[in-house]
Amino acid sequence: MRSVYSLLVCLFICLPLAAQSLVTFQTLPRDLQLYARDGANQAAVVIEGTATDNSLVRVACLLNRNGQVTQQQRFTFSNTRMFRFAPTIVAELAEYGIRLYGYRATGDSVLLAERKRLLCGDVFVIYGQSNAIGLGGLDQSKIDDQYMRQCGYPFGVADIPGSMQWYPASQPYGAVGAFGLYMAEAIMAVTKIPLCLINGSEGGASLNQLADRNAANTTDLTTFYGRMLYRTRWAGYQGKVRALFYKQGEAEAGSSVAGYPASFDRLYRFLRQDYGNEPRLYVSQINIMAAGQANVGELRDFQRRLTSIYPVGVENIATVGTPGYDGIHYSLEGNRQIAREQARQVLRDIYGQSDTLQINSPNIRKVVQNSRNDTLTLVFEPDMQLVWAADSVLDHGNGQYTRKLADVFYPDGQTGRVSAGRATGNRIQLALRQPAPVQALTYLPPYFSDKQNGFYDGPVLKNSRGMRAFSFDNVAVVRALPAITNLAATANATTREIALSWTLSTTAASEVVLERAVIGVSPFAIIATLPATTNTYRDRPPLSLLGQHQYRVRVISRESESGLSNVAEGRLPVVCTLAVSLSGSSTLAVGATASLSASVMGALPPTNTVALRWSGPGSSSAVGSSLIVNGLAAGSTNVYAVTATQGACSATATSTVTVQGACTLSVVIAGAQTIPFGGTLSLSAVVSGTQVGLGPVTSRWSGPAGYTASGTTLTQAGLTPGLSGTYSLTVEQGRCTAGAVAAVEIQLPLAVEEPDGPGRIGPNPVRAGQPLWLQTAGNAGTGPLSLTVWTLAGQRVMSRTIRPARQTELPTTNLAPGLYFLDIANGTQRLVHQRIIVE
């Protein structure tokens, strides 16, 4: 037993050592390694080595994708013992592996090396302090990291170079953290490209600590910066990092913010020097801490202004108002939301995704005070759609209290001066309680904690997608420019134009922004931005917007703007050719789906400005040209209408959808049900209770001896007693079924004998083998006669055609002894219909 154990040990240990002694590798992948993709969306897996055993004549490299071999390369030794392979792998959700074999002249092969779970994808580097990791609730996260990687070392090891290895991104615990993992998950769900996340963050680290870079040894392992850079260089990512993420500032907010901009600039220059200008840098503005320095607003404001300080390659995002915040850190829910919001920016900037509207945090551009000194207008990015939050009534177990958004705007640092606010597009208007000049405006306190809650939980300013606005500190308030007061409009019905003119009363303006609305059709929207030297404009509205137009203008400068001008109106005649029609369901079975489709005709260009509005049961959520409704009540009549609107023109079409009630289908069978022997059965179905819309009515008959037929009538001639019995009829219409039965009796010969016909037969009884004679009167005719003989049980034993004479011999000599029923008829009458006895 000991010898078997020794053999197994040799197989698992000695053979790999033997393979290693055959070759020396200069370059070889590591298990789990992620290669940075190139511009062709792939990467080369470089393998370089030298054969040290002369018995090897060639080496081969096999590349597999998800376990299936996809590439094979061979190298035969001649003048050199060095070899190189560079199979390519693709940036996709697939894992690759390689196997290297050596071959001797005898044909024997040996496995030289094997590497598994290789990926190709993109590389992100994360830096900062604890919120850049996000440990809150991380143990409860369920992230599939099969296609995510990180490279690093176990926490606390002394020999970092000797401990470096590749890991799935969730290992070791907290190496990447919830922020990176959830961001990667959101990005990969769209791109299907694997990601490597190198997180060099350090909890509680200050900016100066993070920016400590040894110029003589940039990968100095005694510094946070050096360790992070060492990991990226070890992984071969020099010049290949796609994005950098920096989340830090809490340390200074709790100690001192002095010198933060200069320290950040130093870190920024180091990052660009070591990682290049290509990676986009994403910076998060820190949240409102429960405690901190009185001037921490300056730090947050610096983070807000980063995109203007570094206008190329930098993006920022706000974290205030994120759920799950405790005054310093975030719960798993909060980290997940921050990560997914960050992912949208990355998908837009790096991967060219089209989800771009309202994904940035609103950023203040300027604050303007009107001439009456009673209103402040906050101007944000032109495409921003802001939402003014209602007052929040909260209760954390110590009684209800109210938070008001107006209370966290501080004119000249003072509280209680703002009475209300409202949002209009990219502007917020704050009403002051008392008119007075304002020099600067701050949004949100430097830190916050009160008796109701240990951290700020009040409303925040958001845009239409819930992105919270950056907090800002001491933004200068400027005086409003004089508004235009003489805007005039003149309509020309012939040219379908409206001529506008105005006079500027200031030289400080740089632009004039012109807005147009159509009364009852569309609100004011910008139609032109013109140089301030312009004082006229000719507007030619789309045909679909003809009608009563309103115009207004605003004067803009880099630092300020005016209020809106007077409103000027101009009317162009409306010629409506719009029409709409409906097609689709009219009558439905119970439980069926109603489907209606609207077709628009006569729309004016641009035709994509036609709006459709549906009405009728179940149509409240309908949009577009199609309406699908389920669950209409049985027996109901439902009227639907669709109204097409384009500018001042509208058209309506209606359609009625009727739902059938419960099944009312019924059927009875009509016709004689007692039939003489040899007669004809004629039955018919009388159907009632059919419903329109259920489809055609089908009928199926069945009867004795396997009899079947279809249709609403049943006709069967030459009946015998064997066809007596129950005849069933089944009628169907769609989902409805009805049935009826008829008991049919075919009379036995004894019951229908007619011995007094115009013909006579004899002798009767007749001996077996003797002929039977027919004697007919003169009125029997001269045409052929049909002769039929049955047993009394109704079984036909003979059927012949005979030529009549005054006395005719009948072909009955083969009849066996017994009692029979004989029938002789010509084309118009029955001559004989009686029993005969054969002895």
Image (spheres, rainbow, N blue to C red):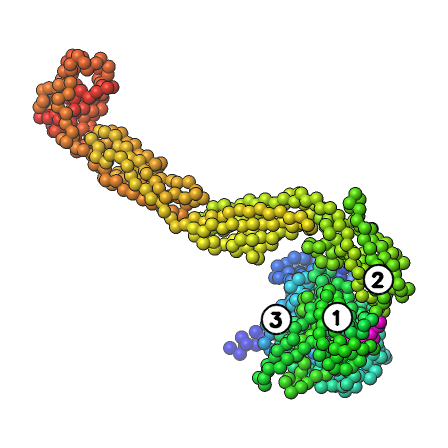
Q: Which mark is residue 429?
A: 1
For label 3, the SS is: loop
Q: Main secondary structure of the magenta part?
A: strand
Q: Nearer the viewer, mark 1 or mark 2?
A: 2
Q: Position of residue 741 (x, y in %)?
A: 27, 42
The amino acid type, in three-letter code, at marker 1 is: Gln
- Where is residue 361, by image quadrant? bottom right
| Residue with the mark numbered 2 | 484
Left/right of residue 192 with respect to residue 306 in the rendered view? left
- Name which residue lies at 81% across and 56% down: 528
Q: Position of residue 826 (x, y in %)?
A: 22, 19
Query: Is the residue 533 above or below the residue 767 in the image?
Result: below
- Name which residue lies at 68% across and 44% down: 576
In reply to whether residue 177 is colored magenta, the answer given is no
The amino acid type, in three-letter code, at marker 2 is: Ile
| Residue with the mark numbered 3 | 143
Q: Position of residue 236 (x, y in %)?
A: 76, 69
For label 1, the SS is: strand
For label 2, the SS is: loop
- Name which residue lies at 65% across and 50% down: 645
Whichever of callouts 1 and 2 sits on the residue coming sooner in the sequence is 1
Whichever of callouts 3 and 1 sits on the residue coming sooner in the sequence is 3
Q: Residues within 10 Å of mark 3 (few under 14, many from 20)?
A: some
- Where is residue 714, by image quadrant? top left
- Segment colored magenta: 472-479
